[in-house]
Image (spheres, rainbow, N blue to C red):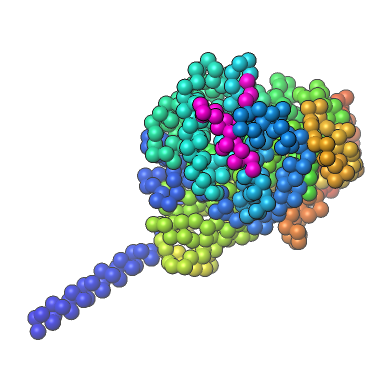
Amino acid sequence: MMESTTFMRNILFSFIIAFVSCKASSREEVSNVDRPDTTASNVSYLSNRKPLRSSYFVKLPVGSIQPKGWLRKYLELQRDGLTGHLGEISAWLAKKNNAWLSKDGSGDHGWEEVPYWLKGYANLGYILKDDRIIEEAKVWLNAALESQREDGYFGPLVLKEGKPDLWGNMIMLWCLQSYYEYSKDERVLSFMEKYFAWQRQLPEDKLLKDYWENSRGGDNLYSIYWLYNRTQGKEWLLDLAKKIHRNTADWKQQNNLPNWHNVNIAQCFREPATYYLQTGDPSDLKASYRNFDIIRERFGNVPGGMFGADENARVGYTDPRQGVETCGMVEQMASDEILMGITGDPFWADHTEEVAFNTYPAAVMPDFKALRYITSPNMSVSDSKNHHPGIDNTGPFLMMNPFSSRCCQHNHAQGWPYYAEHVFMATPDNGLAALLFAEAIVTAKVADGQEVSIESAGHYPFDDQVSFTVHTVDAVRFPYYIRIPNWCDQANVSINGKPVEQTFQAGSYVKIDRTWKEGDQVTLQLPMPLVIKKWEKNKGSISINRGPLTYSLKIQERYIKKDSKASAIGDSKWQASADPEKWPSFEIIPASSWNYGLLYNGQKPEDLIEVIQKEWPQDNFPFTPESVPVRLKVKGKQIPDWKIDQYGLTDVLPASPVQVNTKAEELELIPMGAARLRISAFPVIRY
């Protein structure tokens, strides 16, 4: 009897322990956190090896995220447009005598253009699972791998004053890293190790001495860390990283930048933050934030997230009619995406979206078959004329032309593929994070390696709701992080229809740690406040935001077809078979008045602005004046003295408030990214 009682007690005790453990494992914990915990290490995805500092988010292999909705539509437009067909247009991509296809680096052309294009083109293929693109990319990637010389150098032999120019190779390394993520081709690792061994023995008086490579050495640094994490932490690579940093332009100056070229700034301001991974010195991290602030304090008091540097930023040229290169936009987005991982700061995701939604879409034609070199926040004409010295460069730099803008023509390709690759990222504690909001499905490993999928849905950034649905064969516990943007201070979260009774701070993360089952759903509500932003340092002008979108005056756009060969920039080259009829260029001329100011005297935005919503476009493309699903109505007056200036540009802003006698009119505003002609910084009309 005693043995029977003991046996029953043991059974009961085991049952209680199992019950308590089950309850603990199914307990749902929802918290508001500043960053993910980096004391853990992800067991499925390679992060930084010691002594490198842990990143807060870990990039998933390319192809892990399948975009849907408007983001997929954009990628398909790229595939069917300029990105997917640049190989039949650009002379720099012609295969005959191309030094990138040569085993010894000889040829009559070959520098930055091929890898610029390839890093977006190949990733586009990996994301869309497009066999044609993947196979074409392999032609170039295999050629690069097979071009390595005995000493480790590879690619075109480009010498500047007797010194090897490494800039083109820096870009190709990024192409090879993406290829390795996709294919796991082990040749990439041994190839990079041999190349970096060559860099290690290169005398410092021959290393990174040309302007472009010297400015952009941070890209080389990033690749060294990438390899270090995949080759058992070979210490000599960290010594090389110090050497590269030492010979790169000084991006850690207190109140200055090494140079004022727009692409260099957008691409290279993050170099100190990259080096911070090795040094752990907070001053390195702060330097990248300071660089970001310096260019915007002096030249970026404008809407859209960028700054005025139509080639170079120039003292006295700070008006919103100054623009930035398409290259600068996509490099800024890439820098922001990298800094999301390094710092965990939601600010960088916010800024990625600011540029991606408000500035980059307007730089290309709606069908993605042409682009322009320069795009500005205030841009009432986009033609083939020379606007120098109103803009820094001389030539037809405002023209939508697929044959032109040599660097941007190729480098544009990375913009949306890189964005799509960072919609979700892994976390050190074996979870996932939703960082950039777009419809997509991520398939990734969580917890101890179990594969799950999470599907995001919603018409963000035009709509304020995003939902996430979990798909998993077996129940699994892992943390799921969701970014709360800095512009939203009233975010709401519900899990399986039940509201979470908690306040979430702007500029933070929701962390949901629970056992997830098939079909579980999280809904994020991001009320989008109307905000009137005053640009005190730019004539007291104002811009209007709703959530992450900035709004522009809707200007009737008249497209005038032109011969792409006749209107190309001077250094453009195209293949003999390139057909300008198939690939025309366009001037965009205003067919309605653009010179308006807004009636504003400190009112609450909701008292001044009417929000009008309409059906989502059937083609899933909301970035044209006709298809935008959200419009604003405001009151304004025309300013007769605000005209096109002597350089053929939108004249500089009149100082606000402006006194005029014209009648008040109802004006329609559309998202800035959908407006290829735009007034986004408005003068204020005196009441």
> Quick check: 11 above or below 92?
below
Q: Residue furthest left?
A: 2
Residue 10 colored magenta? no
Location of residue 5 (image quadrant): bottom left
Residues 23 and 444: in front is 444
User: From the image, which quarter does the C terminus lie in?
Assistant: top right
Judged left or right of residue 371, residue 163 is: left
Residue beneath the point at 48% across and 50% down: 426
Residue beneath the point at 85% across and 27% down: 386
> Quick check: 492 above or below 666?
below
Judged left or right of residue 559, residue 533 is: left
Residue 143 colored magenta? yes
The image position of residue 418, as x and y in percent, is 61, 44
Q: Which residues are magenta?
A: 139-159
> Quick check: 474 above or below 222?
below
Residues 188 and 657: in front is 188
User: From the image, which quarter does the N terminus lie in?
Assistant: bottom left
Location of residue 587 (image quadrant): top right
Residue beneath the point at 82% across and 40% down: 578
The image position of residue 314, as x and y in percent, is 71, 22
Q: Can residue 472 be seen at all in this image of the molecule?
A: yes
The image position of residue 19, as x and y in percent, is 30, 71
Residue beneath the point at 38% across and 64% down: 27
Q: Can residue 589 be seen at all in this image of the molecule?
A: no
Q: Residue furthest bottom?
A: 1
The image position of residue 170, as x and y in percent, is 58, 31
Q: How many callouts does the rendering have?
A: 0
Judged left or right of residue 664, residue 538 is: left
